[in-house]
Amino acid sequence: MSDVVMHVWRGDSNGGDFEEYTLPAQEGEVVLDVIHRIQATEAPDLACRWNCKAGKCGSCSAEINGKPRLLCMTRMDQLPEGEPVTVTPMRAFPIIRDLVSDVSYNYEMARKVPAFLPPPRPEDGYRMSQIDVERGQEFRKCIECFMCQNVCHVIRDHEENKGKFAGPRLFIRYAELEMHPLDTNDRRDLVRDKAGLGMCNITKCCTEVCPEHIKITDNAIIPLKERVVDADFDPVAWLGRKILRRTKRTPQEASVQPE
Amino acid sequence: MTTLEHHDYDVIIIGAGGAGMRAAIEAKERGLRVALICKSLLGKAHTVMAEGGVAAAMGNVYEEDNWKVHFRDTMRGGKMLNHWRMAQLHAQESPDRVQELEKWGALFDRTKDGKILQRDFGGHRYARLAHVGDRTGLELIRTLQQKAVSLDIDVFMECKVVRLLTGDDGSVTGAVAYWRPTGEFVTFAAKAVVLATGGVGKSWKFTSNSWEGTGDGHAVALWAGAELIDMECVQFHPTGMVWPLSVRGILVTEGVRGDGGVLKNSEGERFMFNYIADMFKAETADSEAEADRWYDDHTAGRRPPELLPRDEVARSINSEVKAGRGSPHGGVFLDIASRRSAEVIRRRLPSMYHQFMELAGVDITQEAMEVGPTCHYIMGGVRVEPDNGATSVPGLFAAGEVSGGMHGSNRLGGNSLSDLLVFGRRAGMGAADFAEGRAGDVPKLEESLIRHYIDEALEPFTRDEGENPYDLQHDLQEMMQTNVGIIRTGPELDEALEKLEVLKERVNNISVKGGRAYNPGWNLATDLPAMLTVSTCVALGARERKESRGGQTREDFPKADPELGKINFVSRQPAGGGFNEEIKISPEPLPEMPDELKALLEEAPK
C-alpha cells in the first residue's frame, strides 16, 4: 500500500501550526491508529485524548478535514485517497495541547441540571413499559463526545454565550429527564431561563454530527421547546397535567438539589 | 522545594469507573469530604465498555432464580477459587444495587409487565442480566456520574496517581499525583483511600482494555505493602474482533451468544459440543436441537455449550484455530445472522451492529463475525476483607477489578458490573468508617518522600539520549502475549520472568521529549513501572500455580489439581517497595466455606 500524509495541528493556547507526518498506509486503519503510530515513532509527545477505541466513550473527538469526527471510528479508506488528512482539535473549546481541548464547560453545564427525582419505590419495584423507557434511552445513548456542542453555532463562534447556553448535549439531558416516566421535577422554566433553550434556532448541525445518531433536534430540542411554551401559554395543557399526570415539582423546588 | 498544590480529604477514591463512583457516592452520603481522582475525563472509564449487562438474581424472567443459584453459578464459574464470602455478598446484594440504579435514573430494558428485563449469559443458569441493549456499562457509568454530580463530589479529572504514601505505623496517609493537562504535581492527604483503578490488560498485545488498564492500583497497593492474590488468573474473553488488525481485541459482547449466536469453525461445525468439560456435562445440551429449544424455554432443554463460562469457550476457540479449523484471519465464526432476524439483531445488539459495520465493513445481520480470544479482565488483585474492602494496609481499601477474590479463577460475564456496585458501596462504607474512626485531622505527609517520588517520575526528562517508552511498551506487550498468554508452559514463564528483568533495566533508561503538559510519551513512561510490576506478579503466579484452572491454563499441567484449588498465591513487597524491588510469592490456604454454603454447591442442577 502507498503512504498516508497527515497534517496534524500542534500547539497550545499560545498558538501553533500544522506538522506534516508521512507514514506507510496499513489496511483497515482508523485515523486514531495513524495518530498512535505517529506517537510511537516520530512524536511521542503528540497530545491526543482517547480511551475505548471502539466508539463507546466519546473521548477522541476532533476535526478531520474540518469535520467533527471520532478519531477511532473514522476509517482512513473512507477519506479522499491520495490527499493529505488534516486533523485539528475541536474548535469551540479552549485548547490544552495539540488535539486535546478543554471541555470543562460541558461538565459545568451538567452540574446545573437538577437531579432525577422519582417517587418512593413501591414494594415490588418501579414498573415502566418498554415503549416509555425507549424515549429516554435514545438520549442516554449519548457518549458525551461533545461534538454537538462543538458545532453549535450559538457557542462555536460566540464565547460570550457560553455562560447562558447549555447546548445540545445538555438539552437532550433535560429532555430525557422531562420524558422520564418516573421523574417528578419540573425543569421547564430553568431550561428556558438559565439553559438558553430559546437561543437554539434548530439548524440541526448537532444532529448531523452525532455519532450515536440521536435525533437531537427533532426528538429532544423541538419537543422541549413545545413543552416550555405549553407551560407558559396553554391553560388546558396545564390543567390536563394537573389532572391526568402526577404532580411535578415547581421549577423553584426543582432547582434545589435533593437531599 | 516549590510549593506543591495540596488537598486534604477524609476519603480519596482513585479511579472513577463504576466501583470508584459507587464508593464515592457512599462516602459522600455520610457527609465526609470526598475526592474522586481519575486518569481520564469523568464518564470515560473502562466500565463504559461493558456491554451485556449486570448480573442480579431478581427473578424477573425466571422466578426460580435467587441468590443461592447465583452464588453457585459464580463459585462454579470461578472453579471454586473464589472467596466464598465475597461470592455470597455479591449474590445477595446485587438485586438491591440494580434497583438502586433505577432510583437514580437508569433506564433498563423492560419485561412485558414493566419490570427490569434480564438476559441470558454464559455460566448463569437463568436469564439474569439486567441490561440496556448492548450498552449497559454506559448506562451504569452515566447513572453513577449523574448521581455523583448531584452530590457535588469533588472530581480531579485527568489526574494520575503515581504513588501512595504511608505513615510510620504502616497506615495510608495520602497520594502523590500529577495533572495530565499541565504535568504539575499535586498531593492529597487523606484519612482513608479507596483504590478502584480497574485492570491490567494493556500489558498484552491483543486486549479489550484502553490505555488506562496499566494496573496502577495493583502496583501502588503492592508497593505500599498490600497483598495481591492469584494474579495469574487473567481472563481472555472468547470473542474479541480479529480483523482488521488495528481493531483486533475490541470486545464482541457475550450477549450475541446469549441472544442466539453460535460459534462455528471453518467447516461450518458448531464445535463447542466437542468441548463440554465433565463439570458442566449435566447441565449442558448435547445436541443442536436441544440447545436450540432452550433459547425459547429454559425448561425444554439444557443450555447451549456456547454459553459455557468464558475460560472454557476461549480455550476451545484457541484449540480450533490451532487445529487448522480457524477463520481466514485466525479466529472462528460467530454467527447470529442465520439465526435471528435483522430487526431483532439491530434492536438487541445495536452497538455490535454499528461497531462491525463501521470498523470492519461487516453487516452482522447478513454475515458471520470473525472472533477470537482477547485479554479482558484480571480476576486476581488486591486481597481485601469481603465485608468492607479493607486491605492489609490500614486505611487502604479496594473495590472492583483491582481487588481479588470475588471471581476466583474465572469471572462470569455480567458479574463485573454487579461486583462494582456491591463492593464499591462496601469499600465506600469501609473507608468512611475508617476515616470517621481515625483520630485527629488528616495525616501529615512526609515531604522528602514526596520529593523523591516526584523526582522519580520526572527522571525520563533528565536523559537526552535513551529509549522511547513506546518501544518498551511494545516489547512488553509482545512478550506477555507470547509467553504469558492464554496457554502457558513452565519454560515460557521462566523466560518471561527473565525478560521482565531486562525490561525493568530498560525503564531506567527511558528518555522523553517535549514538555510536561499533556505529554503522552511521559505519561506512558510513568505507567510502565506499574505495568512491569503487575506483569511480574502474573508471570510469577502462573509459574507457581502448576495446574489449569479458569484463567490459568498450563499446557504442562493440563488438569486442575484439587490441592491447589484450596490455595491462594499471594504476592508481597515490604512497604515502600517499587518496580525494581523483589516480589515474594507464597501459597496460602483459602478461607474455609461454612457448611450451609457448601450444601448449595452440591445441590443437583434442576
Image (cartoon, grey):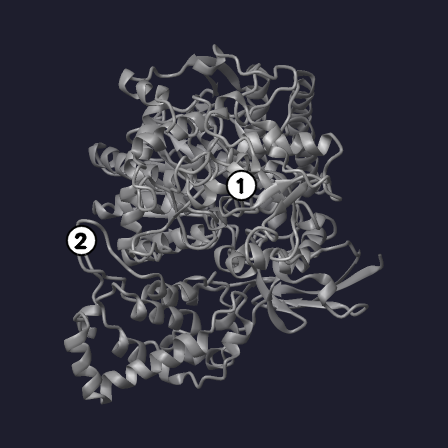
Residue A205 appears in the picture as rendered: yes
| B402 horizontally vs B116: left or right | right
**Residue A122 numbered mark, or none:** 2
Disc 2: which chain?
A
Determine the secondary structure under disc 2. loop
Indicate the position of residue B544 as horizontal and vertical percent values. Answer: 56, 15
Indicate the position of residue B455 as horizontal and vertical percent values. Answer: 54, 38
How busy is the neighbourhood of tag 1: few (under 14 within 10 Å), some, or many (20 plus)? Answer: many
Along the line of sight, the residue nearer the viewer: A239 or B112: B112
In the rendered view, would you say B348 is above or below A135?
A: above
Determine the image quadrant of residue B151. Answer: bottom left
Identified by mark 2, the residue type is: Pro
Residue occupying image coordinates x 29% and y 53%: B115
Q: Are marks 2 and 1 on the same chain?
A: no
Along the line of sight, the residue nearer the viewer: B516 or B396: B396
| CB atoms of marks 2 and 1 within 8 Å | no
How busy is the neighbourhood of tag 2: few (under 14 within 10 Å), some, or many (20 plus)? Answer: few
Residue occupying image coordinates x 46% and y 43%: B177
Residue occupying image coordinates x 66% and y 39%: B205
Q: Give the mark count.
A: 2
Along the line of sight, the residue nearer the viewer: B430 or A184: A184
Identified by mark 1, the residue type is: Gly
Determine the image quadrant of residue B598. Answer: top left
Determine the secondary structure under disc 1. loop
In the rendered view, would you say A128 is above or below A83?
A: above
| A169 horizontally vs B69: left or right | right
Indicate the position of residue B583 as horizontal and vertical percent values. Answer: 53, 20
Question: Which residue is label 1 attached to?
Answer: B213
